[in-house]
Image (cartoon, coloured by chain):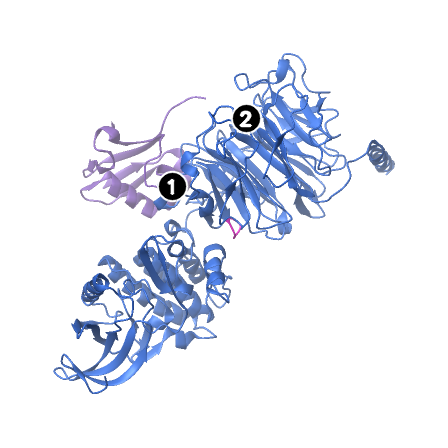
Chain colours: A purple, B blue
């Protein structure tokens, strides 16, 4: 089981759910995201752009590690992995 | 060839003939069964490499092994002729079965599921049909559907097997495109490589034809059909076609491949869902998704007939100001889209609509949203409706401008976006497509971003000529189309680009805004990055009209709704210090098409006021007398209801204002009033006095009552 932590701004597209669990065996972040937006299509275009790239100011963590440092979307997941989708912090 | 033996097949009779070759009924002398044998003509435009490819693809197709795909038994050559031996399917084509009247929805679903299943199998094996049509689908006497000619169309340049309908062949970029025109996807007509999604478009055409008995895109000539495929939306299918089935067809027939179903399996699942009675939406399989977002904890405007609206986009959300026709007391509604920049807003009142369009930007992407209830609820589409096609390698950054199309085409709108491009919808925003003629312009790679990014920020329609339109790009300059967007030419002669080595280049100017008056559509006004210009010949030539203004640097420029010689600007000091000149916020007006300008300042801050009004921060209404409104980057909103002579502060303390738009409600319907199409003389002082007198009399009567 993989668990997504959904930020408040996207819960409109997950039926209000803050946590979305997906039954997956060994897989990658990319596989898990694809499964997420198969369940909740509205999340997709908020997280990646039309060219399939994660939006510039959106960060994805597996556990406490930013996937930027663990292999990007190819980061391997294990049973029980927790994925967080987090917008960047900035001011203005 | 009747009576001849090819391999171990004896030819019995001729069944038909098409552009590719002749089809015979033959008898298998070994297995004692009848087969169909196609002999490909030597003259069918297949060269030696094409013949080899045809053989390879036919052999690949022979391994598909699906009950709804016509089985190919053998492919070979005899005396230089390619022959294909395949299962003999005796039955009626879907074209014959549906001609004129169509089939029942139950039959359409049953056949559609089988076709989608066949496509799914082929696509999984890397085989694209490329010529799916109702004449290529036969229902055998036992009721089993068979899709014919899988993988055979690709290499056939001269035509298509057994095509009774118009076949189309052209050469683009050295590669041959083949198929049957009414079934061809827009991207294939544009010369893009055909992929499996082209088959899904064709499946949408087939489903439409089965439901209605006629094609969704028709015309008297190939040009008309192509134009309809690229630009038009199919006529909606009502009862007895269930909404779910129509939704599936619509999604198959989405112009942009990225917005279609991506696999045949998805189409099959959607059709099965309709068949089983499940609800299917056109845009999302997640039926639980709310199509709109209701704005709670926001003060809404109570809008009624005769009211006047100011729509204000800021860096932290949108606001609606409501007033009556006097435009002196204002009720504030909002903020809508808390914290999000709203660069573009517009009211669309055509054909009785009550729709506000807004573009929001955030970390989560740029979204185009609309409200039909003055902001109480807004669409929040699961999928971003404005998206660059995959082959462009480009992604949307911002929507800078939303422009309704002609009054008599209420389903048409345009969006100018960053990176600089124009999008068009012809179905009220359900589907948007990139205007390729501009995007593919050879100048585009040489446009450079201005300070605000590479933005297409102005879209100006010529009300006298539906084929003509202007756009302005920072920094690319002005471009005009005279053929409804197919081709564009730079129109910048006389406009200075002081930051370029060549001060008067063909393109590359940093144009800040352009406008025209509907009664004189050949005349345009332009606020440049340094320079104010007028063109009297539809943009062919421009001349400087900055006669006596304190600075010719600024952003907005608007034309008086009734007087084509009257124009308003708000100069700022310089490129370096983009604030009102000498700390005095002044609007400048010309009533002589730029021969001279006068400052309008009464009621505007004239001391230590370092303000900036951005390109969409100035707007006019078409009331009598005309109102004019400006919003500043410091969040001040001013209005004048006497054509700029005197100003009142409408609100102070808004977030930084980037966009101001106007609308009025009249006679139960709402009219956009940025620029009136009426040609009238400017309101004279006498007429203004008369109007005031009438108003006072009305007020006196109201008090008495």
Q: Quadrant of the C terminus of chain B?
A: top right
Any magenta on residue B194?
no
Q: Quadrant of residue A6?
A: top left
Q: Residue at x 70, y 27 (%)?
A: B589
Residue B318 shows in the view? no
Q: Residue at x 41, y 64 (%)?
A: B181
Question: For this rendering, which residue is in front, B663 or B307?
Answer: B663
Q: Quadrant of the N terminus of chain B?
A: bottom left
Q: Residues within 10 Å of mark 1 (few under 14, many from 20)?
A: many
- In the image, is residue B569 above or below residue B370? above
Q: Which residue is mark 1?
A: A45
From the viewer's perspective, is B94 left or right of B607? left
Q: Which-is-in-front pick, marks 1 and 2?
A: 2
Give the x, y percent position of residue B91: 32, 80
Give the x, y percent position of residue B538: 61, 41
Which numbered disc covers residue B529?
2
> Magenta residues, as a range?
B425-429
Q: Helix or strand or loop: what does disc 1 sit on?
A: helix
């Amino acid at each position: 089981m993989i668990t997504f932590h959904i930020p408040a701004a996207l819960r409109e597209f997950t039926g209000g759910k803050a946590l979305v669990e997906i039954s997956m065996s060994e897989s990658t972040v990319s596989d898990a995201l694809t499964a997420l937006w198969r369940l909740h299509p509205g999340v997709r275009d908020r997280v990646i752009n039309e060219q399939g790239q994660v939006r510039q100011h959106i960060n994805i963590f597996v556990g406490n590690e930013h996937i930027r440092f663990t292999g990007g979307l190819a980061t391997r997941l294990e049973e029980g992995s927790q994925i967080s989708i987090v917008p960047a912090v900035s001011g203005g | 060839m009747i009576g001849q033996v090819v391999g171990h097949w004896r030819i019995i009779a001729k069944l038909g003939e098409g552009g590719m070759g002749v089809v015979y009924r033959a008898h298998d002398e070994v297995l004692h069964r009848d087969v169909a044998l196609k002999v490909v003509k030597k003259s069918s435009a297949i060269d030696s490499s094409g013949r080899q490819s045809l053989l390879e693809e036919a052999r690949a197709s022979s391994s598909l092994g699906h009950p709804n795909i016509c089985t190919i038994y053998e492919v070979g050559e005899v005396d230089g002729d390619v022959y294909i031996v395949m299962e003999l399917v005796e039955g009626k084509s879907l074209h014959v079965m549906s001609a004129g009247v169509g089939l029942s929805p139950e039959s359409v679903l049953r056949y559609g599921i089988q076709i989608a299943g066949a496509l799914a199998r082929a696509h999984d094996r890397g085989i694209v049909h490329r010529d799916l049509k109702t004449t290529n689908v036969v229902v055998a006497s036992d009721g089993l559907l068979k899709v014919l000619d899988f993988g055979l169309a690709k290499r056939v340049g001269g035509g298509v097997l057994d095509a009774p309908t118009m076949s189309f062949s052209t050469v683009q970029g050295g590669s041959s495109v083949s198929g049957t025109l009414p079934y061809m996807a827009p991207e294939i007509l544009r010369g893009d490589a055909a992929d499996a999604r082209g088959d899904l478009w064709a499946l949408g055409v087939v489903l439409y034809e089965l439901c209605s008995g006629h094609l969704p895109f028709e015309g008297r000539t190939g040009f008309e059909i192509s134009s309809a495929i690229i630009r038009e939306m199919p006529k909606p299918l009502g009862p007895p076609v269930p909404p779910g089935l129509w939704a599936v067809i619509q999604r198959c027939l989405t112009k942009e491949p990225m917005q279609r179903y991506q696999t045949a399996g998805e189409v099959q699942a959607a059709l099965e869902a309709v068949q089983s009675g499940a609800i299917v939406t056109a845009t999302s399989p997640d039926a639980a998704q709310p199509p709109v977002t209701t704005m709670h904890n926001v003060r809404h405007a109570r809008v009624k007939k005769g009211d006047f609206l100011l729509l204000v986009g800021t860096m932290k959300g949108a606001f609606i100001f409501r007033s009556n026709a006097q435009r002196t007391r204002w009720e504030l509604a909002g903020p809508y889209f808390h914290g999000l920049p709203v660069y573009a807003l517009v009211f669309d009142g055509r054909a009785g609509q009550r729709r506000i369009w807004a573009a929001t930007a955030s970390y989560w992407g740029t979204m185009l949203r609309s409200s039909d209830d003055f902001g109480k609820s807004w669409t929040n589409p699961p999928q971003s409706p404005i998206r660059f096609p995959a082959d462009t390698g480009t992604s949307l950054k911002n929507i800078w401008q939303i422009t309704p199309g002609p009054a008599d085409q209420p389903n048409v709108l345009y969006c100018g976006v960053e990176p600089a491009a124009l999008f068009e919808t012809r179905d009220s925003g359900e589907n948007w497509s990139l205007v390729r003629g501009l995007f593919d312009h050879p100048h585009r790679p040489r446009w450079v971003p201005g300070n605000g990014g590479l933005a297409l920020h102005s879209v100006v329609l010529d009300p006298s000529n539906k084929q003509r339109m202007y756009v302005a790009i920072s920094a690319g300059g002005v471009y005009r189309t005279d053929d409804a967007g197919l081709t564009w030419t730079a129109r910048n002669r006389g406009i200075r680009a002081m930051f370029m080595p060549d001060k008067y280049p063909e393109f590359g100017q940093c144009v800040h805004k352009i406008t025209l008056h509907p009664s004189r559509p050949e005349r345009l006004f332009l606020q440049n990055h340094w320079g104010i210009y007028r063109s009297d010949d539809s943009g062919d030539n421009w001349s400087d009209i900055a006669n006596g203004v304190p600075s010719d640097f600024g952003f907005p420029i608007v034309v008086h709704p009734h007087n084509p010689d009257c124009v308003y600007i708000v100069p700022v000091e310089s490129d370096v210090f983009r604030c009102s000149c000498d700390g005095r916020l002044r609007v400048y007006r010309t009533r002589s098409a730029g021969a001279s300008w006068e400052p309008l300042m009464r009621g505007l801050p004239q001391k230590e006021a370092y303000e900036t009004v951005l390109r969409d921060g100035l707007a006019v209404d078409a009331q009598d007398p005309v109102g004019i409104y400006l919003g500043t980057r410091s969040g001040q909103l001013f209005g004048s209801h006497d054509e700029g002579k005197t100003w009142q502060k409408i609100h102070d303390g808004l977030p930084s204002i980037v966009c101001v738009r106007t609308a009025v409600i009249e006679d139960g319907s709402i009219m956009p009033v940025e620029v009136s199409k009426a040609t009238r003389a400017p309101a004279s002082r006498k007429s203004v006095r008369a109007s005031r007198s009438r108003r006072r009399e009305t007020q006196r009567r109201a008090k008495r009552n």
